[in-house]
Image (spheres, rainbow, N blue to C red):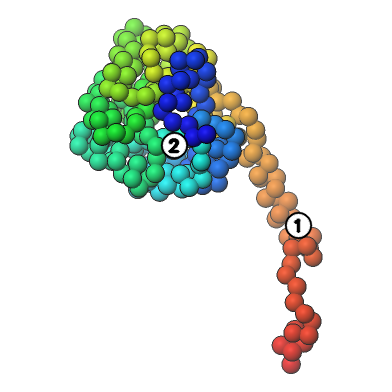
Amino acid sequence: MKNTVLTFKKAKENGEKLSMVTAYDYAAAKLVDTAGINSILVGDSLGNVCLGYKDTLSVTMEDMIHHSAAVARGAENSLIVTDMPFMSYQSSVYDAVVNAGRLIKEGHANAVKIEGGVDIKEHIAAIVKASIPVVGHIGLTPQSINTFGGFKIQGKNIETAQKVIDDAKAVEEAGAFAVVLECVPEKLAKLVTETLSIPTIGIGAGRFCDGQVLVFHDLLGIYEDMRPKFVKRFAEIGKTAVSALQDYDRELKNGSFPTEEHIYAIDDEIINVLKK
Ligand code: KIV
């Protein structure tokens, strides 16, 4: 069954956990969807894991649309949430609505995710008014790393913890149907989760959020450049892949690949004619 915003609402009401995993292409989307994950996030983390940038700031609307549309072709039941990239909404409410609309029309997303709280309340409300479901994203918002001075845990003192709470309330009041809480202390995430009537989806926000999100490449052990404390690697696909590539390299060089089972045959008579 297709996951929708109603799935998120019911999960919060019934105290059921929600799963979200990123994906950036057709094949990965098929795997995540087949695994029964509630939601696929086409995250702007594609800038890191697919495009090799050191942060998400260079990711464009065209990148997001391209990857989102590929994911949409591979996912049947997971709810597709696509990130609004840096500078696709900060500039104005108008830009926010137009670009959210492009992610739905051209990227075939079911919903968009947008970083920020109080500062972009109006933007979220306008997108929701345009009938586009919104997931908020507060705490450590990677598009603001230059303001934070790096990838730092947010909400560790009264002032910043209050900001996380204020942002959470703003996002809910603006009409978002869920909110991602990134890198905040567990007890603060628990308080936010108990305060809001929309589900919280945690990443580095502890055990008491209504759901969790992880990056596909982190969860499967494919990406080595960064290894945050909150990541659990449920497999070591990267190591398996390197070993398989080494086997391929060795076998083709020592002549044990390809074998007869991998070839296409042709009648010798035809070859003989060609040789004349
Ligand atoms: O882009 C992304 O993958 C994200 C998650 C880290 C929540 O925003």
Q: On the rendered image, what quadrant is the C terminus found in?
A: bottom right
Q: Kindly identify the amino acid type of the residue bearing the numbered disc 1.
A: Glu
SS at badge 2: strand
Task: Specify whether 177 is left or right of 235.
Answer: left
Residue at 71% x, 54% y is 248
Residue at 26% x, 20% y is 118
Task: Say above or below: 206 vs 66.
Answer: above
In this orientation, does residue 21 appear?
no
Q: Which residue is mark 1?
A: 251
Residue 35 found in image quarter: top right
Residue 31, percent from left and from top = 58, 40
Residue 28 found in image quarter: top right
SS at badge 1: helix
Q: Residue lying farthest bottom?
A: 276
Of the image marks 2 and 1, the number of the one nearer the N terminus? 2
Q: How many discs mark residues in the rendered view?
A: 2
Closer to us: 138 or 103: 103
Residue 129, percent from left and from top = 25, 30
Residue 25, percent from left and from top = 49, 45
Residue 146, percent from left and from top = 32, 29
Ligand 1 lies under 8 Å from the Cβ of mark 1: no
Q: Which residue is mark 2?
A: 80
Q: Residue lying farthest top?
A: 158
Ligand 1 lies under 8 Å from the Cβ of mark 2: no
In this orientation, does residue 119 appear?
yes
Mark 1 surroundings: few (<14), some (14-19) or many (≥20) residues within 10 A: few
Residue at 37% x, 34% y is 111
